[in-house]
Image (cartoon, rainbow, N blue to C red):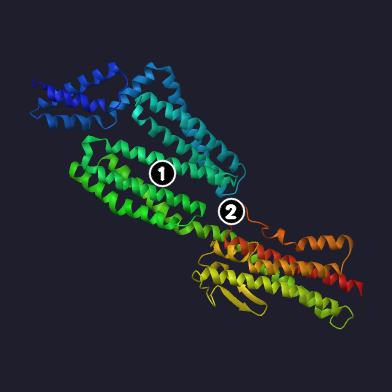
Amino acid sequence: MPELSLHHIDQITSDISKQEITFSHLIHDLIDHVCCDVEYEMQKGLGFSEAYRNVKQKMGSRRIKEIQEETLYAVDTKYRHMKNTMKTSGIAGTVLLGFAALFKINHWPLAGTMLTLGAVILAFVFIPSALGVIWKETHNKKKLFLFISAFTGGMCLIIGTLFKVQHWPGAGIVLSLAALFGIAFFIPALLASKLQDQENKAKRPVYILGAIGIICYGAGMLFKIQHWPLAGVLMVLGMIVLGCVAFPLYTWFTWKEESHISTRFLYMVIGMLLIIVPGALISINLQRAYEKGFYPHLEEQQLMSDIISAQNNSLLATYHDSLSFPPMEQIHIRTAELVSYINDIQVKMVQASEGKPGQPAVSPDQIKQTETGPVIQYSLLSNPFNLAPVKDFLLPGTISRQGLDALLKDYSGFISGLLQGEDLHKITSLVSPSNYLLVELPENRTISMMSGLHSLELMKNSLLAIESNLLNIVAMRR
């Protein structure tokens, strides 16, 4: 019977030691078992390298770890409890999130409850128990930082996603922490672990490129969700590095080393698809999805503005030959002046957004001129979440805002000459700009153009409603 040399035994011992076997007596049994299998294969006339490769293929890449897991499960009660907790909580949390997504899509009740419960189970039961199981199986202090950063980042990601979906405060902070742990700690720690692998020196450039691509892609996803600038650039850069450089190189090295398709390669292909396809869809559709949430409200406000204006004009025409007409006409003129000024601000905001910095568009296609004045076609806006227009035209201290505040103050004084008592208080309170626009901008807060346009649409309708009320009051007096 062929016998293994000391060099061959050392090679098998080194390979099994890399599997992070924590039971000292188990590692010796495994080495003896593999050596016997290799010697049995060598009886068929095979050399050591081919015989050893056949044994590893029959065992699979995880069989040695599975033997340790089965041994721990049989002899360690604490490990068994952690393992069962991990499995139960993982299944329960995933099922709850699945049902929560279904209920959320169909707008059924209890969706928020199941979403919250599933996220809490995964974040505070599954992840800690999984970390305990992995530590029990490896006891690898060199990878402890890698494990902690991965699970902490995963916990923050789950909780941050829950807060984002539920529209709770602090979602952005938690998601930023998740990205920080992933980008600044987990990926570098994983890269360092891979670079220490002496058997795959040729793949080190691939690992470095892969880490760069994942960091860019992850940062881009965070920037996209938070509506920060450069999100698209980072996501495209990350996908180019991953899909066009790192993955082809990895495929080439794997092709040269292995004559068959391994499960690791299949997982890599699936993982790339899970990154690139959803990322591309999110990059294309995420902003549009947010826009569409604004469109119905803005279009409804425009329709309401047309209806109230038509009613006010009809009322004026009815009293055209009465003694009430002069004061009613004055009310109409004052209101029309304010509405026209607001329309001008909206037009300037769209022109600034559709043009270049310092060069506003003169006649953008997004503004349609009608008999009643300019109408913004919101669905045609190319950059609806631009932050500059609100900063330049609506914030306190800007020329447009100062003019608007002055007109509103003058309009409030005009109303005071027409009304008294409770009616005056109710109507003048609606004229205050603080009901629609910020009196002062809190630190680190930004406002998109869509939000600013929506606030101005609300202000216009409030002014038209005030005009309607005033017209009716004046008409009833005469």
Which mark sits nearer the N-terminus, 2 or 1?
A: 1
Do callouts 2 and 1 mark residues in contact (Cβ within 8 Å)? no
Would residue 469 be visible to someone looking at this image? Answer: no
| Residue 37 numbered mark, or none | none
Kind of residue indicated by mark 1: Ile
Residue that numbered label 1 is attached to: 183
Q: Is residue 254 above or below residue 400?
A: above
Q: Is residue 381 above or below residue 34?
A: below
Going by the image, does 160 lie left or right of 15? right
Q: Nearer the viewer, mark 2 or mark 1?
A: 2
| Residue 445 numbered mark, or none | 2
* SS class, disc 1: helix
Name the residue at 43% across, 29% down: 131
Q: Is residue 13 above or below residue 105?
A: above
Name the residue at 66% across, 68% down: 302
Q: Position of residue 96 (x, y in %)?
A: 53, 38
Q: Which quadrant holds the C terminus?
A: bottom right
* SS class, disc 2: loop
Q: Which quadrant holds the N terminus?
A: top left
Question: Which residue is nearer to you in this view: 33 or 209?
Answer: 209
